[in-house]
Image (cartoon, rainbow, N blue to C red):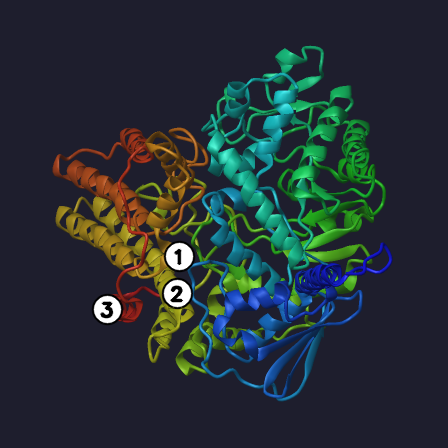
Amino acid sequence: MFSSPYYPNVQQLHIYNMIRKEIITAILLLFFFYGCKQKPIVKDVQRSPIVDLVQRIAPDHASYFVFKLEKGDRDIFKIESKDHKVVISGNNYNSLAVGFNHYLKKYCKTYVSWYSDDKVDLPKKLPEIPSPISRAARVEDRFFLNYCTFGYTMPWWQWKDWERFIDWMALNGITMPLAITGQEAIWYEVWQELGMDDEQIRSYFTGPAHLPWHRMSNLDKWGGPLPMSWLEHQKELQKKIVDRERELGMTPVLPAFAGHVPEALTEVFPEAKINRLSSWGGFDDKYRSFFLDPLDPLFKDIQKRFLTKQTNLYGTDHIYGADPFNEVHPPSWEQEYLATVANTIYTSMVDVDVDASWLQMSWIFYFERDHWTNERIEAMITAVPQGKMKLLDYFCENQEVWKMTDSFFGQPFLWNYLGNFGGNTMLAGNLDEVESRMENAFQNSGDNLWGIGSTLEALDVNPLMYAFVFEKAWLSGSVDTKSWIKEWAESRAGNKNDGFEKAWELLHENTYQYSTTLGQATLTNARPTLTGSGNWTTNPDINYDNNVLFKAWQFMLENPSETRQTYAYDVVNIGRQFLGNHFRLLRDGFSQSYYDRDLGQLKEKGEKILELFDDLDRLLATEQSFLLGKWIENAKDFGVDEDEKKYYEHNARNILTTWGNKAQSLNDYANRSWVGLTKDYYKKRWEMFVCDVVGTVEDNREFDADAFFEKITQFEWDWTFENKSYEKLPEGNAFEIGRELIEKYDNSKIPPKL
């Protein structure tokens, strides 16, 4: 057979063709798989983060939605019906999520909760949109969270909780979430490199629920040493958090070094300029924190180590939260010193990240106004280049710092609604005033209003306030709050419901006219006393008529939408507040019987006091948002062995009750009406009180308040070490129990007003 180097024989040609065919097939397969992998990058928006979000929120209806990305720097969305589908257009995934949520609220009458266990109730057939509608955001920055939220709500969250919550943030247009999870794993490496050992480092950290106050330089060591398993878990969790937030068009605000260092660092660097900060929260001196003077050469070294490691692990969006003196005093109040501190913190960021900007709380400028004069504030915040420091005006529903400081002396700021302290379960929110203040800020604060947001200390029982604040960012001009409340009621009920609408109308006019304040609680959650409320952290005063609240509760149960979880939640939430308010009348009647030395009436009224706790507990048990068992079991799930499970459970119990040690000044700060707490903690305290007061009348003695305080303090502390299990899942029917309690606590039996 003929063969040559230039003319292959038949066998060679056959082999050549086989190889050629295999190569072509391989190339085609590579193009196919590469093309599939790259689809989202080529902006096929039907394979994207927004489509994934819809699959999580409304999996049975996902094919009903079409999304289109359009060019444009301004956040905007448009929704319309085309070919029996809802078409949502927007300039980015965040805007598309807001458009999707707008459709759910306004057309499907559906509210999406921030809790992963809450159902999303959608109609079987989704409605069409009569005519196209579009909205544009009035501000670019929409901030959410507070250091404290990571202690009062989020310490025991797993990824499924974060996943729903991040979806909720996207649906509500949040673009700047505080993202401080997982930083202890980085600090562990930094302090180790600087010569500290494992025990020194982990003992410097607090327990998980108390980490927010450690991160804000308020508190060291309390509840430590922090388990290594916690550090590793949170590091991996933070990777998922920031990745998902970025996918959905958000700019996570990561932490930076603000000067807080371990006490043990004074031994490693005895020449370093390290000062002990002022005491905080009534804690012993051994828990006070330490501050490295920014002028010390070590400061920039620590900042570089921390930011470099953080960027390598979590990436960066070039904005960092740093709050050097939150509720603690700086080593000097001299304006020049404060300016130097601010400038050094900022330049130490820029040395690592040339595009860095700084986000700073302005809570201290309100909270410690006597110290933070305008001269000191101006010196500190203007030491940072214009536009490179953003201020969070923290508690604007109560006090707007921008008005006190000539609009923050030109630095950009964000108007924020706080709304909750400690996770207290109190109905509160000055809806009309928030509308007025926000609109005034939009119109009159100048060009340096860059955004809005919420700085709530915990997710709470007033979801309408946060829905309103973030929706306001997409509504041009003043909002008719009466119309808004009507739409809110429909989104909770699932349709038009006259009774429910009347209830929310009453709640708007009667209850949601007053700002949240520090230390709110119904008297059920307060330390028992004959008068007053035991501690500043449990003020039961209300400014509205509890009879009207009762009437709203009645309206809710006239013809309820019993399949709607949001409807059931409102029935429980309003009933819970009414019973808590009503309790004060029972206590005052009990106290009067004591002063009258009327033993018969004293015993009868004491029984009524304890009976109300049982009624409250039954009602709360029907709604998963009010379960202590879920909080404790979620904490225990972090434990890798029995000792760790007990450690986490104690920390979880402690933050809700004593907060710190026995007789802590923050005792009950995080009080909340939850099943388990209500019956086994709050009721037990009042049971001991009723028993002791009745005993004094029986023995013809005076009630010894000091002796009772000692006894109750020991009970509280012992309770934090208990290991009793509580239900993780709701039980009972909110509507049936609600009707029973309305019959029992008939409005005609209630005095006009507290």
Distance CA(mark 2)–CA(mark 1): 8 Å
Q: How many other residues sit within 10 Å of disc 3, few (<14), some (14-19) or many (≥20)?
A: few
Q: Residue 470, position in %: x, y?
A: 62, 63
Contact flag, marks 2 and 3 (Cβ < 8 Å)? no
Residue with the mark numbered 2: 569
Screen quadrant of the N terminus: bottom right
Location of residue 167 by image quarter: bottom right
Secondary-structure class at tag 3: helix
Contact flag, marks 2 and 1 (Cβ < 8 Å)? yes
Earlier in the chain: of badge 3 and badge 1, it is 1
Using the image, determine if residue 301 lies above or below residue 543.
above
Using the image, determine if residue 244 lies above or below residue 219.
below
Q: Which amino acid does label 1 sit on?
A: Ser
Q: Which of 225 and 400 is in front in this view?
A: 225
Earlier in the chain: of badge 2 and badge 1, it is 2
Q: Which residue is drawn at 83% across and 36% down?
A: 383
Using the image, determine if residue 382 lies above or below residue 75.
above
Q: Residue 216, position in %: x, y?
A: 60, 35
Whether residue 386 is visible here, answered yes or no, is: yes
Q: Which of 253 and 20 is in front in this view?
A: 20
Using the image, determine if residue 341 lies above or below residue 489.
above
Residue with the mark numbered 1: 625
Q: Residue 74, position in %: x, y?
A: 78, 66
Q: Could you say which disc has been placed on residue 740 in the image?
A: 3
Contact flag, marks 3 and 1 (Cβ < 8 Å)? no
Q: What residue type is labelled 2?
A: Tyr
